[in-house]
Amino acid sequence: MENSEEQKYRVRRLEISDKGKGFIELLQQLSVCDSVSDKEFEDRFRDLSVLGDEHVIGVIEDEASGKIIATGSVFIEKKFLRNCGKVGHIEDVVVDSSIRGKHLGKRMIEFLTEHARDMGCYKVILDCSVENKAFYEKCGFQQKSVQMAMYFA
Ligand SMILES: CC(=O)SCCNC(=O)CCNC(=O)[C@H](O)C(C)(C)COP(=O)(O)OP(=O)(O)OC[C@H]1O[C@@H](n2cnc3c(N)ncnc32)[C@H](O)[C@@H]1OP(=O)(O)O
């Protein structure tokens, strides 16, 4: 991506005004997220803000349209293992369907993994579908283990 494009599509942290810029609609392209009121959004935003650098949500805003077109999050798990080591967990990565394939997903992953590295994590991990395995490999990840889940709702 050229420098002007890099400037245009820079990753920044989520801001409280981003709900009005299509942030929730973007998340809907990943999973169920259809009834978040303004109050619920603000309450959750404040809950997460208290965590500071321990939980970061990145976004890319399209300056032309003012819409949020990519997002992803990373939270930092503090462990006893690895001599009180830390692990970064990447979640909720999505690029707007109109602009996929232009390396915005990769930029988002770079932002999130760099944050985990800066926070002193010894590794960063994520779960993904088989369809997205090649994308994460291009971002430098390797397949490890098996994903397990138990849903309560
Ligand atoms: C931890 C999680 O959140 S998993 C959930 C991931 N999100 C989703 O599934 C939501 C729907 N999908 C998307 O939003 C997007 O397709 C994403 C986030 C998976 C990828 O974002 P994009 O911006 O389209 O990917 P990007 O352009 O950065 O791709 C980087 C490289 O991976 C490749 N790539 C991207 N997706 C795929 C794929 N599904 N299969 C094979 N290669 C892929 C690209 O061709 C590119 O290769 P290159 O470097 O050789 O040119």
Image: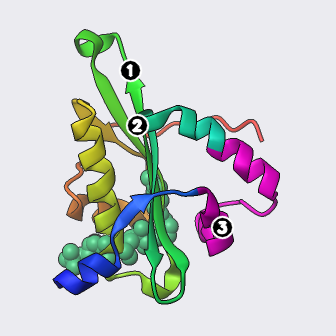
Structural distance between the alpha carbons of marks 1 and 3: 30 Å
Classify 10 Å Cα crowding around label 3: few (below 14), some (14-19), many (20 and above).
Answer: few
Dot 3: element = loop
Q: Residue 61 at what x, y percent from top left?
A: 47, 74
Checking the image for residue 53, the label placed there is: 2
Most foreground residue, 16 or 141: 16
Classify 10 Å Cα crowding around label 2: few (below 14), some (14-19), many (20 and above).
Answer: some
Dot 2: element = helix
Residue 23 in magenta stretch = yes
Checking the image for residue 78, the label placed there is: 1
Is the CB of the residue bearing disc 1 within 8 angstroms of ligand 1? no
Structural distance between the alpha carbons of marks 1 and 2: 13 Å
Residue at x 72% of width, y 60% of height: 33
**Which three-letter amino acid code belongs to the residue tagged 3?**
Gln
Q: Earlier in the sequence, mark 1 or mark 2?
A: 2
| Highlighted magenta segment, given as a residue range | 16-45
Residue at x 51% of width, y 81% of height: 97
Q: Residue 56 at what x, y percent from top left?
A: 45, 45
Q: Is residue 143 left or right of residue 43?
A: left
Most foreground residue, 53 or 149: 53
Classify 10 Å Cα crowding around label 1: few (below 14), some (14-19), many (20 and above).
Answer: few
Q: Above or below — where is 44 with respect to 21?
A: above
Structural distance between the alpha carbons of marks 2 and 3: 25 Å
Residue picked out by circle 3? 28
Q: Residue 85 at what x, y percent from top left?
A: 27, 19
Q: Earlier in the sequence, mark 1 or mark 3?
A: 3
